[in-house]
Amino acid sequence: MTIFQAYIKYHSKMIFALILFCSVFSLSFFLYRLPIEAVIYPVLICAAFGLIFVIVDLLQTKRKLKQLSEIKKLNASMITSLPPASSIAEENYQDIIKTLQDEITALGTSSSARYQELTEYYTVWVHQIKTPITSMRLTLQNEDTPISRKLSSDLFQIEQYVEMVLAFMRLDSDSSDYVFKEYNIDSIIKQAVTKYASEFIDRKVRLDYEPINKIVITDEKWLSFVIEQLLSNALKYTRTGSIKIYLREPMTLCIEDTGIGIAPEDLPRIFEKGYTGYNGRKDKKASGLGLYLCKRICNNLEIGISVTSELDKGTTVCIDLEQYDLKQHLTKM
């Protein structure tokens, strides 16, 4: 429906009343045998003035609708003013909008404060719990028995879960300090591999990795978290065989395992929060947060992540480090 059609429909009652009044006057003059010109001339003059009024009012309505269409693109917090009200009803509507906007702002402020408080609490909790974890690790280092090795492995998993909690809480926080610099991708990979070295040895899983020697612009801490999480998943679901880390040209980092694989029906949903799929239901320890966090972090780093898998043959996770969007942004700047 065009603006003109909508305008006519909105003022249809007034137009009908005007036609009705003119008809009543014309009928009265006709019944009393008065000169019909006495009605026609005033009607034509009124019609001319009415047409001018309609054109002016239609242009004002069109301008107001244009302003409103621009306002619709804004968030509630960004709306500072509305077009001047032309009726009592519009004034009431604008008062209601202002009241709702104030409520949304208050709720947003309250929610942000609660989120910040929760983030600070868990941040303190993480740092506090690291103290006994470190103490336990130092104690276990003095022993080399099957039980101590098992406890060390379990303790390592606890550390990973603690880091996952901290990453989850900081993901959308203003304190998610992304610092983009140039890094050699090998240095980040080697840190992650070193961290999981004991897991590779205990599980008797072979690592196939040759230096890549490529420079990438990224945030070291967050990319390290992604690689570590992918290695953790690969180790968790690879009973025998190997894990291979390699670069697919031009800048796609791949982590390939010979594990149990992912069911085809689970692949489209593996990045959803809390979704564990068949493997997760089989392994009761799965949280459904690891790949979700990886996807969110990759989005923030403006890099792509994808997964291909085949049941009982293995899984390959690829991270596209090319950063097309970031490069375009930097070029525009």
Image: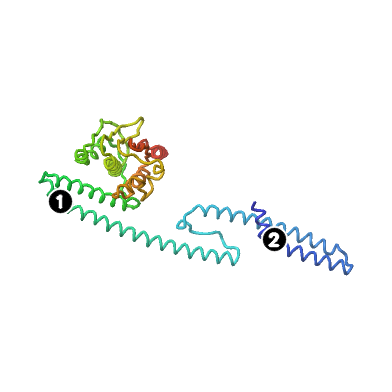
Determine whether, in the image, residue 281 is placed left or right of residue 198. Answer: right
Residue found at x 68% / y 61%? 11
Q: Position of residue 88 (x, y in %)?
A: 59, 67
Which one is in front in this view, the residue at disc 2 or the one at disc 1? 1
Farthest residue, direction bottom:
32
Q: Is residue 328 above or below residue 292?
A: above
Determine whether, in the image, residue 124 is placed left or right of residue 83. Answer: left
| Other-residue count near label 2 (Cα within 10 Å), few / some / many at <14 / 14–19 / ≥20 | few
The residue to which callout 1 is attached is 136
Where on the picture, by quarter, is residue 212?
top left
Q: Is residue 110 above or below residue 305?
A: below
Q: Position of residue 162 (x, y in %)?
A: 25, 51
The residue to which callout 2 is attached is 12
- State how the image is colored: rainbow
The residue nearer to you, when weighing 78 against 267, is 267
2 or 1: tag closer to the N-terminus: 2
User: What amino acid does circle 1 point to?
Assistant: Met
Contact flag, marks 2 and 1 (Cβ < 8 Å): no
Residue found at x 75% / y 58%? 48
Determine whether, in the image, residue 157 is placed left or right of residue 85. Answer: left
Label 2 to label 1: alpha-carbon separation:
81 Å
Q: Is residue 193 above or below residue 20?
A: above
Label 1: state its secondary structure. Answer: helix
Residue found at x 73% / y 62%? 16
The residue nearer to you, when weighing 22 against 289, is 289
Q: Position of residue 263 (x, y in %)?
A: 38, 41
User: What amino acid does circle 2 point to?
Assistant: Ser
Say if residue 220 shows up in the picture.
no
The residue nearer to you, when weighing 45 against 184, is 184
| Other-residue count near label 1 (Cα within 10 Å), few / some / many at <14 / 14–19 / ≥20 | some
Q: Position of residue 294 (x, y in %)?
A: 33, 44
